[in-house]
């Protein structure tokens, strides 16, 4: 209530200030009238205003100016009338209730974004969210409020007041006592934003904010003041050159305290200082060639209490980054880009020195787009990235990543399109241990794939694709060489869609793959996994209101030990899985605002194991599911809307969780603009 009262006083004060403030939005007509009156007073008869006098004697311009002045005067009177009715705002409120299986959610929102007059804007957002999970016996709630009042003093200067509050509670027993964990954050700040153009090429911006902040949790409490400052200068003398320099700084001073059962264990004065300086520039040398530069430097220092140590922790960090990118588009058939980037970060801790770290990354990327012949597009890309991390542990080391990508797209005419993609990727991971680290390894991946889209008729579309890939991992240390392996994957896929009479459609997808894994020094671990999937969908639009769908999915997988010796192949299957999923559903629009849907599903899965070459049934999983849904939406005018959706699920089967054999999902939403 106190906050609402403060906002109301600010609104009244702002409107009074707006009424007393000098009007800087003088219309051209008013300006011209004032010039005429001054000229008349200073002596137009003496010849000091001959040009103005001649224009007025013509008469036409004077009439147009007077009409414009009358229109502007009417608009100002309208704005003044609206300003006197600043209380006639229209907030939007909404309520949402959802229950899905064992989780129930409640959410309510109130939002307001109102321009009270030509200078004052008010924004208010508040929400309450609650979530309960009966299976986990847990309840979470989050309340958030944000209020913002902006007052534009002039075209260059704006003032603002912002209030934020969030309260989070975590309760680990739905029927127990108070919350197990509660946290509250609250902040209030006053800000100013100055944005001014010194010339057509130079503009400056300065933003400053100051306020208070408070953070309360179960053990840690801190409150204090915060200041933010940001400044930027932009220079753009022409369309070919644009540069900017920006600075951002934040200072936070808090009084912190760690409590335990009401007893103060530790208190401190914490200080956080963050600074960032960045530079950006873009220059176009000639049409088709451009270069961009981005660089930044940031430093920070944080002091905060450590609950485990009951002492003040000091964290320091710094970082810098730079990147240069260029684009060359000199020829219509050849364009390419090149970029180089570098960044590094450093963190040090006073108490937890084991968390000290230094990470450096460098990246080189290039790409080209070539149109070698008619209907063909070739995209080539490459990257080389080096990452080094230094820690107080044995994880200090380097990662080197190299990749090359090639993609060719060929237009085969109005009915067909072909694309071929090739990828080569190499990753090397090494650590600085004096003795070889067991995790030192190299990994190389090569992949090639193709896709063909073919539309023989208007109502028939087909797709066909294939893929072959090789993934090889090699561990450097001899004791880890048993993990060295090579994986090969073969995959073929296809699909088609046919639209028949009365908009009946048939869609089928096929996918067949085989994955071979070979261990270089442990042949007994070699394996083969084969997958086959077929999915069929039928859509029957009986009427404009009634639609029926039928779908079936078949999956088959077998796996086991695989080896090759003397040109012969030996495959010993260990297990096999086969599943069928059949679904039948219909959707009926009973009324314009009312929809009904029902679905009947059946699932069957069989698992076999192989012992001594004999196939034995391991277990069978079968379940059925019936789902019905009703959805209703209703609108009252342009400001009120209701929606309700109810789903009832029923499952039967030996392996169905007892808690979810029968459950209901309910969703209700209501919104209104006052």
Image (cartoon, rainbow, N blue to C red):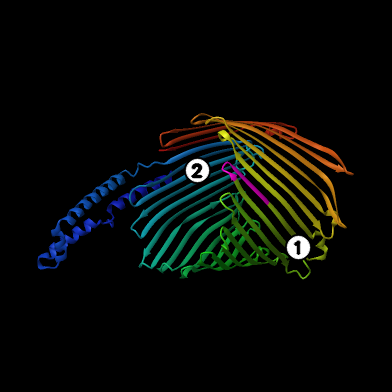
Q: Position of residue 602 (x, y in %)?
A: 70, 33
Label at residue 127: 2
Q: Residue at x 63, y 51 (%)?
A: 452
**224 relative to 6, above or below:** below
Q: Main secondary structure of the magenta part?
A: strand
Q: Is 461 within the magenta?
A: yes
Q: Residues within 10 Å of mark 2 (few under 14, many from 20)?
A: some
Q: Helix or strand or loop: what does disc 2 sit on? A: strand
- Residue that mark 1 sits on: 439
Q: Is 248 within the magenta?
A: no
Relative depth, front residue between 404 and 188 = 404
Image quadrant where residue 475 sits? bottom right
Q: Residue at x 67, y 60 (%)?
A: 423
Q: Nearer the viewer, mark 1 or mark 2?
A: 1
Q: Residues within 10 Å of mark 1 (few under 14, many from 20)?
A: some
Image quadrant where residue 371 sits? bottom right
Q: Position of residue 489 (x, y in %)?
A: 74, 54
Image quadrant where residue 407 sits? bottom right
Query: Where are the magenta residues, as a range?
Result: 456-465
Evaluate whether residue 629 shows in this view.
no
Relative depth, front residue between 188 and 509 = 509
Location of the N terminus (image quadrant):
top left
Spatial distance from mark 1 to mark 2, Cα to Cα?
48 Å
Is residue 629 rendered to the left or right of residue 490? Answer: left
Q: Residue at x 31, y 52 (%)?
A: 18
Counting the numbered discs, the total is 2
């Amino acid at each position: 209530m106190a906050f609402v009262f403060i906002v109301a006083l600010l609104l009244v004060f702002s409107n009074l200030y707006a009424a007393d403030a000098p009007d800087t939005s003088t219309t051209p007509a008013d300006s011209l009238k004032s010039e005429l009156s001054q000229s008349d007073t200073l002596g137009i008869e003496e010849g000091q205003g001959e040009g103005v006098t001649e224009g007025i004697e013509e008469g036409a311009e004077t009439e147009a100016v007077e009409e414009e002045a009358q229109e502007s005067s009417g608009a100002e009177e309208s704005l003044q009338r609206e300003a006197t009715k600043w209380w006639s705002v229209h907030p939007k409120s909404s309520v949402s209730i959802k229950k899905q299986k064992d989780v129930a959610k409640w959410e309510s929102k109130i939002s307001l974004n109102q321009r009270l007059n030509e200078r004052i804007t008010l924004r208010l957002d508040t929400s309450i969210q609650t979530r309960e999970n009966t299976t986990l016996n847990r309840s979470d709630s989050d309340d958030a409020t944000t209020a913002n009042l902006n007052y534009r003093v002039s075209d260059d200067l704006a003032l603002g007041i912002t209030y934020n509050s969030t309260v989070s509670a975590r309760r680990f027993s739905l029927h127990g006592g108070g919350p197990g964990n509660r946290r509250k954050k609250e902040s209030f700040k006053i800000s100013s934003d100055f944005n001014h153009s010194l010339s057509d090429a130079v503009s400056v911006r300065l933003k400053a904010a100051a306020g208070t902040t408070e953070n309360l949790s179960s053990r840690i409490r801190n409150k204090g003041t915060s200041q933010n400052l940001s400044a930027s200068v932009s220079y753009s003398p022409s369309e070919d050159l644009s540069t900017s320099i920006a600075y951002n700084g934040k200072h936070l001073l808090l009084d912190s305290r760690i409590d335990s059962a009401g007893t103060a264990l530790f208190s401190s004065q914490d200080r956080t200082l963050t600074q960032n300086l960045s530079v950006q520039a873009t220059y176009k040398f000639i049409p088709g060639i451009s270069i961009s530069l981005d660089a930044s430097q940031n430093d920070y220092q944080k002091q905060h209490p450590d609950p485990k140590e009951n002492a003040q922790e000091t964290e320091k960090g710094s970082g810098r980054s730079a990147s240069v990118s260029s684009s060359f588009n000199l020829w219509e058939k050849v364009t390419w880009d090149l970029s180089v980037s570098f960044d590094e970060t450093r963190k040090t801790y006073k108490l937890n020195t084991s968390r000290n770290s230094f990470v450096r990354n460098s990246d080189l990327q290039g790409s080209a787009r070539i149109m070698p012949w008619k209907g063909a597009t070739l995209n080539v890309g490459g990257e080389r990235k080096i990452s080094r991390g230094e820690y107080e542990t044995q994880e200090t080391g380097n990662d080197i990543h190299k990749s090359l990508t090639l993609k060719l797209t060929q237009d085969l005419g109005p009915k067909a399109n072909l694309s071929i993609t090739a990828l080569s990727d190499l990753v090397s991971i090494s650590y600085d241990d004096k003795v070889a680290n067991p995790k030192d390894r190299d990994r190389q991946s090569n992949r090639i794939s193709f896709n063909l889209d073919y539309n023989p008729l208007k109502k028939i579309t087909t797709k066909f694709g294939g893929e072959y890939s090789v993934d090889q991992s090699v561990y450097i240390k001899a004791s880890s060489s048993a993990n060295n392996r090579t994986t090969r994957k073969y995959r073929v896929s296809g699909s088609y869609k046919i639209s028949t009479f009365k908009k009946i459609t048939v869609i089928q997808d096929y996918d067949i793959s085989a994955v071979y894994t070979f261990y270089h020094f442990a042949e007994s671990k070699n394996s083969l996994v084969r997958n086959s999937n077929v999915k069929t969908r039928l859509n029957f639009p009986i009427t404009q209101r009634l639609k029926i769908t039928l779908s079936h999915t078949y999956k088959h997988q077998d796996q086991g030990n695989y080896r090759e010796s003397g040109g012969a192949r030996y495959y010993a299957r260990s297990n096999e899985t086969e599943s069928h999923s059949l679904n039948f559903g219909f959707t009926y629009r009973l009324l314009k605002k009312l929809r009904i849907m029902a679905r009947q599903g059946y699932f069957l899965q069989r698992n076999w194991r192989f012992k001594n070459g004999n196939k034995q049934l391991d277990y069978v999983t079968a379940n059925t599911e019936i789902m019905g849904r009703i959805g209703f939406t209703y609108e009252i005018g342009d400001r009120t809307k209701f929606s309700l959706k109810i789903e009832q699920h029923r499952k039967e089967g030996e392996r169905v969780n007892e808690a979810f054999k029968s459950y209901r999902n309910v969703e209700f939403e209501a919104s209104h603009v006052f």
